[in-house]
Amino acid sequence: MKDDTDKTLSEALDVPAIPADDSALEPIANLLDMLRRTGKKYDTDKIIRAFLYADALHAGQFRVSGEPYISHPVAVAEIVAGLELDTDSICAALLHDTVEDCSEKTNCSKIRQSFGEGVAMLVDGLTKLVQLKIEDKEEAEIENLRKMFLAMSKDIRVIFIKLCDRLHNMRTLYAKPENKRRITALETMHVYAPLAHRLGMQRIKQELEQLALSFLDPIGFEEVQRDIDRKFGMNQNFIENTKENVAAKLRDYNIKFTLEGRVKSVYSIYKKMYNQNKSFDEIYDFYAIRIIVDTELECYTVLGIIHEMYKSVPGRFKDYISTPKPNLYRSLHTTVIGRDGIPFEVQIRTWEMHHVAEYGICAHWKYKSGATSQSDIDQKLQWVAKLLDSDSDTRDPDEFMRTLKIDMFHDETFVFTPKGDVIVLPQGATLIDFAYAIHSEVGNKMVGAKINGAIATIDSIPKNGEIVEIITSSASRGPSRDWLKIVKTGEARGKIRQWFKREQRSENIVMGRADVERELKKYNRPFTDTQRDHIAAAVAARIGIKSEEDLYNTIGYGGLSVTKIAGKLKDEFERTVIAEEQQSVPQADELHVKTVEKPAHRHASGGIVIDGAAGCAVKFAKCCNPLPGDSVVGFITKGFGVSIHKADCPNVKAGMMRETDRDRWVSAYWEAGADSDKTTYEALIQIYAKDVIGLLAQISAAIADMRVSILQINSQKCSGDSMILNMNISCKNTDHVNSIVSRLKGITGVVDVVRGFS
Ligand code: MN
């Protein structure tokens, strides 16, 4: 539990003692009063100590509005107290900005020492949320939100306190500069309000939305507000009259009730105008009354009474008691026509439903006596886990945001499975979404569907209360790519994508591998599968692809054409296959062994036989140009087969001396018939002569007479009047070249003729 950073906190503050004088506690007088009124047990001393500690840490800090900074954490703590969260939550609210803003004086382990693990963990969670600075707005929002979800899965109270923090920041946002207001308001609208909605915290959600709208569209906000006031003035006392009438009737029936009446919020009317593209005067339902009773049965009784009193608007009745919303909201909703034909909405619920509606999951702290176990709440939070799950394989932040917004903003459709289970889908979701909501395998094997027993196309959009049956077949070849355009939920889209990734990958790999193989075969050399994969892996690495499988996959689905990497494939082919071939040229020792084992196996190439070395290329060394009849020796070169020298070649003598090359000399000899008429060899002769005009002509004539062809000739002047002629001629063998040499020696003016270049 000890933290090293403790030592760096030279100025670490101790928690101040609780003063005898109450004046120091003035800033939290209201908070303490609120806590007393709840009638619940709080560790007031701990809360006071948290305040004193935070007050000391924030001393000298001020908000943009000019107030002392401590006013903010105290206000947040009051909102948290309003939710009647526990002592630790209130302490954490008071301390929530200390680690972030006073890092030189405190840290989480210091808070752990002074206030215990529970408070420290909450402060830590809140600090981490704050540290996620909003730079690139949309991505940051999403990232932030993800972190929030993660934090929430650890402890939901972190989110509650964060929402309270945001609510107070929104209430005081007017003090911030214009550009900051907009970013904060947008973030509130897109992230925090939907989150509050998801958690069922209507009260906080509505206030957040209302405030965010007032900053995002101040003019539109004021217009709607003015219109509401005007309308309210025209229909004076409508709500009062209606409430009186309803109350009188309910009393007749002996029902204990609480009645609330209200005009709908500016935000809800503004949203209706924009979503439905209507003018203010076309919006008719902006009055609402709420009847809160004790029992569920009374809810239905009251509904009956209301429908008896007023004409109901068709299609507006909703029973969220038998089919709760995913955020646990339960109520009966109906819209009826009141005095002067003015419609109004009626919400009927029990107190328990009311608390859940207002405070969401917090209601479990607020209204259930005794300690509420975390596991209780964890269970209620399964839908959050589901939300998180459905997007876990969506790495694209835009898509995450889009699907999240869709999932959060749209109303839900409730559809039944044939067994009567309720599946909740966002509005507009199709039967494919339904199938994937049941299970990925149901979606993947889907071949058809029925709505209320009648065959329906799989892209049909089910309506509330319909029974949907998915027809599956194990012969199904899986989802179609078109489904991606049809489905509405992130969950279904993610699962379909995953299928394609998984299923098609193996197909893609097979196709890509075949493409690569075809390309490699162009080089007309045998290669093994291992070599092929090795080559592909090397090419993959060069172009930044992780593995050869990924390379095949990319080629397979058409992300990369094999011609684009042909050059690199050739490169790597040479590096592996050809290099390995060269390494596999037999060594001298091996040759010897092979001679013993397989004396009959000989191979001739260019008239030369090399013991045991089958199929290797042979060339004649330029330094000595051996001829049949010469005794020869072979040298295994690096990469060009065996080079044949005359045994008395000066290079052989020198080469044999080299220790490192000794093993590379192999015995070689001329094949029988190598000197037959058909084959000729290149020979070199050197003629020393007096520089006599016409000598060259006589030499040429003699050579022509012997039917020997001259391949190349050059002359060089020497000192005095002598000269040297170098000639490459073509001849059959040593006897042949010797006869040429003696013939040339007989020419007048020729001093000497030798074979080979000196
Ligand atoms: Mn704060």
Image (tube, rainbow, N blue to C red):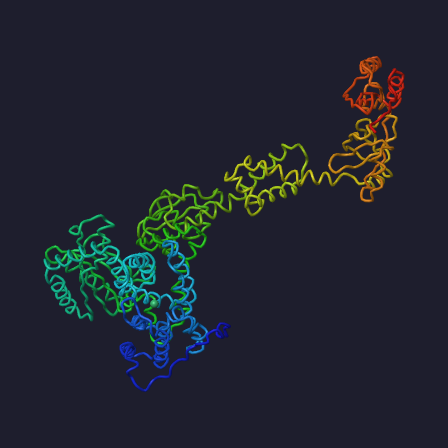
Of residues 345 and 181, the one drawn nearer to the viewer in this rendering? 181
Side (left or right) of 62 relative to 230: right
Image quarter for ligand 1:
bottom left
Horizontal and vertical percent for residue 118? 42, 74
Of residues 747 and 512, the one drawn nearer to the viewer in this rendering? 747
**Quadrant of the rendered structure where residue 591 is?**
top right
Residue 493 seen in this snapshot: yes
Horizontal and vertical percent for residue 309? 14, 60
**Quadrant of the rendered structure where residue 133 is?**
bottom left
Residue 415 seen in this snapshot: no
Horizontal and vertical percent for residue 217? 24, 55
- Give the tally of numbered discs: 0
Side (left or right) of 371 relative to 563: left
Residue found at the far bottom of this picture: 20
734 up-or-down from 518: above or below: above
**Quadrant of the rendered structure where residue 185 is?**
bottom left
708 up-or-down from 651: above or below: above
Side (left or right) of 290 relative to 490: left
Side (left or right) of 288 relative to 389: left
Of residues 622 and 373, the one drawn nearer to the viewer in this rendering? 622
Horizontal and vertical percent for residue 248? 13, 67
Residue found at the far front of this picture: 720
